[in-house]
Image (cartoon, grey):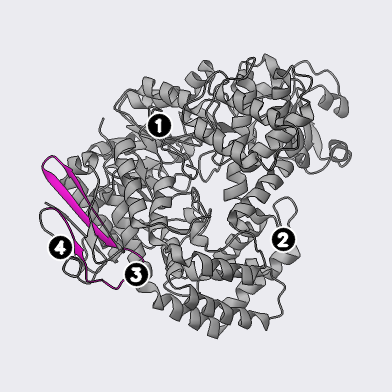
Amino acid sequence: MTLPRATYRIQFHKGFTFADAEALVPYLDRLGISHLYASPITVAAAGSTHGYDVIDPTRINPELGGEDAFRSLVAALHARDMGVVIDIVPNHMGVAGGGNAWWNDVLAKGRDSEYARFFDIDWSRRLVLPVLGDTLATTVANGDIAVEGDRIVAYGEHRFPIRAASDTSDLAALLDQQHYRLASWRVANDELNWRRFFTVNDLAGIRIEDPAVFDATHALYFRLYDEGLIEGVRIDHVDGLTDPIGYCRKLRDRLGPDAWIVIEKILGAGEGQPVGWGIDGTSGYDFMEQVALLIHDPLGALPLEELWQDVSGRYQGFEAEEFEARQDLLSWQFSGQLDACVAAFAALDTDEAVTTAMLRRAIERLLWVFPVYRTYGTGDDAPASDARIRGIVRERLSWLIPPGEAHVVDRILAWLAGDGPGDAAEAVRRLQQLSAPIAAKSVEDTAFYRSGRLLSRNDVGFDANILGIGLDEFHTLMVDRARDVPRAMLTTATHDHKRGEDVRARLAVLSTIPDVWRTRVEGWEAMSFAWNHDVDGGDRYMLLQTIVGAWPAEGASGDFADRLKAWQQKALREGKLRSSWEAPDEAYEAAAASLVDSYLSDDRFVAEVTAFVADIAAAADANTLVQTLLRYTVPGVPDLYQGTELADLSLVDPDNRRPVDYAARAALLGRDDAPAKFRLIADLLALRRAHPGLFAAGDYRPVAVEGSDRILAFTRTAGGKTLKVAALVRGTAIPDATIAFDDQPVSARDAFGERVIWYAVT
């Protein structure tokens, strides 16, 4: 097994199969890719477009071609000395549509099912299935539930097994005899008695900490690895597990030292890399954040914040938006999970002076201010790195704790540290598995859609409180990366990003010209007022940013309006201010969509946006080249998300998972007139192929620059070879500066020429 030199992420589904990927192998090889990085390949819900709703982890998905087609793909890759890395999903399984045999067995047999231990279910009451559009009584009265053979069928599509001991023909009595209770979808947040993935009722959490569950769900992966068909894994949502560190170490023990293992993990502000977990690092959101910070000018923060406040009327910063979103989401969408967490701690506490209500208040407030996704205690122990997090939480809580209840907070923090009385494993588990989804849903799926200072800073794994960082801080981050996780994945685009890497690169330019941008926005705002719309200022401003950021080369033609409206509807519903998924305000959404049409049908607006995008094109392209250069040259394994060899002007999913024209990309290989980004990627991949040891083992040493604070320069050395890299950030005007490489100082103007990047291997 070999460390991937460079990966290429492919989203598999029934419309893009293993056979389709096999046809791309020659292109990927010529491009310089060493490993295909596959989305989940196990059996998923019928028609799944992403594969994360796994219903059978023991088989390769027949919709993708099944195992024979997978083996054929691997053989084609091996013939070119290439390999495969797969995405695995240990946290949850898909349970909708009746296709999950394990789940169906649990529904039919309850606690007696051999698979009951697989799912995280509270068996103190019947399993709640929130699939109905109304109450059970109303649904039955309307004739929307019937018995068909050995199944109870709701709305003609939801099919549930009937308990073997059922012995009545009365429908109401029959429903009451089942191990499950059909209920309205509206009760899920409050009454669900099994762990789900975030707020998705179709995805049930599994107990991967149980050795039997681990073995059953991983047998296929181990067989594929043992047979040499895969060379590594990316672990989806590791922070959802009971014991992420223990799981990772167990996986490493089973796969051995040569397997490449990376985890999907969001690092909070100041949170360290997952050192000591037995893995190679994260799947790259942290690098995406680091390089994004580098191309944004921190001096633009105040004027852009003032512009956002003037247009939106929302005067609280992102920190306050996140705090409010955490309060909202904990109350609205996770109250049932919170109840179970509080009950677990109440069962531990024998102090009559500590009431259940006190525990609830303490846990609520702790979750309002938690600075990271989660801590990693086991009830009787905790890693040393958790101490910093607990300290931050205690400090933040100082002004939120009700009078006389500080000792309750301290007691909970002691349990998280492994220092509290009794067996706290269950209570700690519940709290840590609650803090992670609260963080994700509050920040990524709520506050990012409420706060819009600059949308290029609102993406997965980003800290929107910060606009940009200096060169020295970036250097420090890369030195740490070389020391701690030199084999981690590096990415700037994923299937989960909120907007494409080149949308972010374009919007980042606005941080360098906030006054120019304000003038443009004020003109477009004045234009829109004449259209007599009723769209909120914040929603208008986010729309304007999105139009500019995603503006296609061909202009506002084709499906651009439809793509904007799809993004806009999702943004409005995720923000939960003027609309929501639970209660869509269709009139407001229609007004917002009408504003899209008004903008794109206005000749003056289209001309001005076209001109503005052209004006900032050079700076935007420079940002694209800088982040591309760094992805392929700093320590780590670079990933190329499908299709992003060319401009990535995608929006949030499903827009970022659209079909890719691979024929067009293959035709560009070797052509001097190919776009600069494409040529840069191909050249850097060729360099990595020619010098694999240098890129795999090279150190990272910052290089001083005299005469400019906008040139990032560094070297990497290994095996007698040295990589030299320099990049001009936040602009295109090349300064009169000297890059002080040890062996030979270089003039910036001589090095860059007409470009903003320079690199060489000596």
Mark 2 highlights which residue? 578
Name which residue lies at 78% across and 32% down: 182
Compare marks 3 and 2 and give the one earlier in the sequence.
2
* Amino acid, disc 4: Val
Mark 4 highlights which residue? 746
Q: Where's residue 215, x and y in %?
A: 48, 19
Is 606 placed above or below 242 here? below
Mark 3 highlights which residue? 731
In the drawing, does residue 525 fall left or right of residue 208? right
Give the residues drawn in magenta, as a range. 713-742
Sort mark 2 into few (<14), some (14-19) or many (20+) by Cα contacts within 10 Å. Answer: some
Compare marks 4 and 2 and give the one earlier in the sequence.
2
User: Disc 1 and disc 2: Cα gap in Å?
Assistant: 47 Å
Q: Nearer the viewer, mark 4 or mark 3?
A: 4
Q: Nearer the viewer, mark 1 or mark 2?
A: 2
* Amino acid, disc 1: Glu
Q: Nearer the viewer, mark 4 or mark 2?
A: 4
Q: Nearer the viewer, mark 3 or mark 1?
A: 3
In the drawing, does residue 97 fall left or right of residue 246? right
Mark 1 highlights which residue? 67
Q: Quadrant of the N terminus?
A: top left
Sort mark 3 into few (<14), some (14-19) or many (20+) by Cα contacts within 10 Å. Answer: some
**Tags 3 and 1 touching, CB below 8 Å:** no
Name which residue lies at 49% across and 28% down: 244
